[in-house]
Amino acid sequence: MFQLAVPIIYSLLWSRAVGAASGPPNIVPLHLDAGFWYGSFVVGPQNFSLAIDTGSFAVIIGKGKYKPNPMSQQTNQGEFIQFNGASEDGVQMATEVFFFVKDDATFAGVALNDFLVGNITDGDPLGGDGILGFSPPASMITDPNDPTFLAGQSLAQAICDEEGISPCEFGLTLKTDGTGSLVFGPLDETKITGNITTLPTLSHDAWIALNQTEADSALLVIDGEPVTHLIPIFDNGTPNIIGPLDVVRSALLSVGYNLTEQTDSDGISTVFGTYDCSRSPARFGFSFPPSTEVHYIDEGANVLNRTADGKICTANILGTSTVTAPDWQIGQTWFQGRYVQHNLNASTLAFADLA
Ligand SMILES: *[C@@H]1O[C@H](CO)[C@@H](O)[C@H](O)[C@H]1NC(C)=O
Ligand SMILES: *[C@@H]1O[C@H](CO)[C@@H](O)[C@H](O)[C@H]1NC(C)=O
Ligand SMILES: *[C@@H]1O[C@H](CO)[C@@H](O)[C@H](O)[C@H]1NC(C)=O
Ligand SMILES: *[C@@H]1O[C@H](CO)[C@@H](O)[C@H](O)[C@H]1NC(C)=O
Ligand SMILES: *[C@@H]1O[C@H](CO)[C@@H](O)[C@H](O)[C@H]1NC(C)=O
Ligand SMILES: *[C@@H]1O[C@H](CO)[C@@H](O)[C@H](O)[C@H]1NC(C)=O
Ligand SMILES: *[C@@H]1O[C@H](CO)[C@@H](O)[C@H](O)[C@H]1NC(C)=O
């Protein structure tokens, strides 16, 4: 899920460093369920199934699920955040209010003392038991004008610090069969094939690729044809590909899809494309200049659903009035079949096809 760039806060309402531990690699198995990738996170005696989300920062647990234990220490600090891309089709938004608890947690086989775990006290239902944020650090961790505001703590950084993983990096290997893993440490080159593409990203808030000029920015490519330049926000916690309404509408029309448009009671408009399942579907992908290699979304992952008779398919690309050009959210469907490496020190995202 992508944590909206302007949260409404309370006041307004590669190699291991020499000497690093050489224990077993820190790997977390993941599985796909209704658009989100879940892994287990243990806090106190509780074992939760939380959605890995490179689009948000904090670790937060669903309302009513997180029980105190003898090591829990309440804080009076928390946050109120809004997410988009909170449902399998990307349409729903979710709003959550939470307060942090310092607690003993275990993730990737690593014990963390006094880790900040968010306890949701009010909010919209979330899949699984909550969210494990893996974005780069929030640009505002605390607010000098609001002592109750706290953005949380980076789980990735906490694991790296504890294990001596430097540079601090982790990879997501999400396969097309619904299984995957989160792997701490350098990219495992035995698991990939082809070229590695490395993109500079913002150091804070989101895995957003940086560009110097329009010409060096990413391109949406449909069936081999470049369509438009864009700024990609890589976020495995977004269930699909989400772009600006007008751009997605014309892209879907250009490949002969029918449009399904809706405007909800909040005035948010969305568009999906439907097509006859017997035709060969359009291929949607992205390229990253200067390379002209096109990195397509897996065909299977790009079918959101089909009608009961199996005749009409809906493409898993959402156009919405809540996303403004040139931004696009590149969600988990694009991650499928790739090894996507996130480096918090270098502020880079690198990827390659899974072998
Ligand atoms: C947590 O639950 C998962 C899935 O049921 C299981 O694989 C894992 O071993 C459990 N971890 C602990 C520490 O109980
Ligand atoms: C989480 O908040 C609820 C109240 O909404 C509270 O009952 C519960 O004890 C809190 N959990 C922890 C670990 O503090
Ligand atoms: C990565 O960043 C951490 C925290 O700032 C720092 O301690 C560490 O030395 C950095 N590692 C490298 C290889 O730059
Ligand atoms: C990998 O990069 C090289 C050099 O840029 C290029 O010639 C080659 O076509 C690329 N491989 C693929 C599979 O695109
Ligand atoms: C980066 O790329 C976007 C999308 O093409 C473009 O709108 C923007 O102007 C570019 N930024 C710079 C600094 O050129
Ligand atoms: C697309 O729209 C046309 C005209 O309304 C209709 O005849 C056709 O069945 C629709 N096809 C799909 C796949 O929705
Ligand atoms: C397919 O998904 C679209 C978009 O969420 C939805 O409007 C439509 O009802 C779904 N169709 C089926 C048959 O589930």
Image (spheres, rainbow, N blue to C red):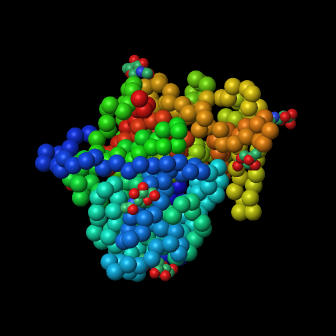
Q: Is residue 211 or residue 232 the one in the foreground?
A: 232
Where residue 237 appears, x then y in whole percent?
A: 51, 51
Where residue 14 appears, x then y in whole percent?
A: 26, 39
Q: What residue lies at 42% left-to-right and 32% top-to-bottom?
A: 354
Q: On the picture, is 253 further left or further right than 301?
A: right
Where 79 falls versus 326 (above or below)?
below
Q: Is residue 352 or residue 27 the one in the foreground?
A: 27
Q: Is residue 129 or residue 258 the one in the foreground?
A: 129
Q: On the picture, is 70 further left or further right than 267?
A: left
Where residue 34 appears, x then y in whole percent?
A: 60, 51
Q: What residue lies at 44% left-to-right and 54% top-to-bottom?
A: 39
Q: Can residue 248 be seen in this view?
A: no
Q: What residue lies at 60% left-to-right and 32% top-to-bottom?
A: 299
Q: Can residue 321 be seen in this view?
A: yes
Q: On the picture, is 100 further left or further right than 277?
A: left
Where residue 129 appears, x then y in whole percent?
A: 51, 64
Q: What residue lies at 39% left-to-right and 47% top-to-bottom?
A: 182
Where 75 falls versus 38 (above or below)?
below
Q: Which residue lies furthest to the left in this view?
A: 19
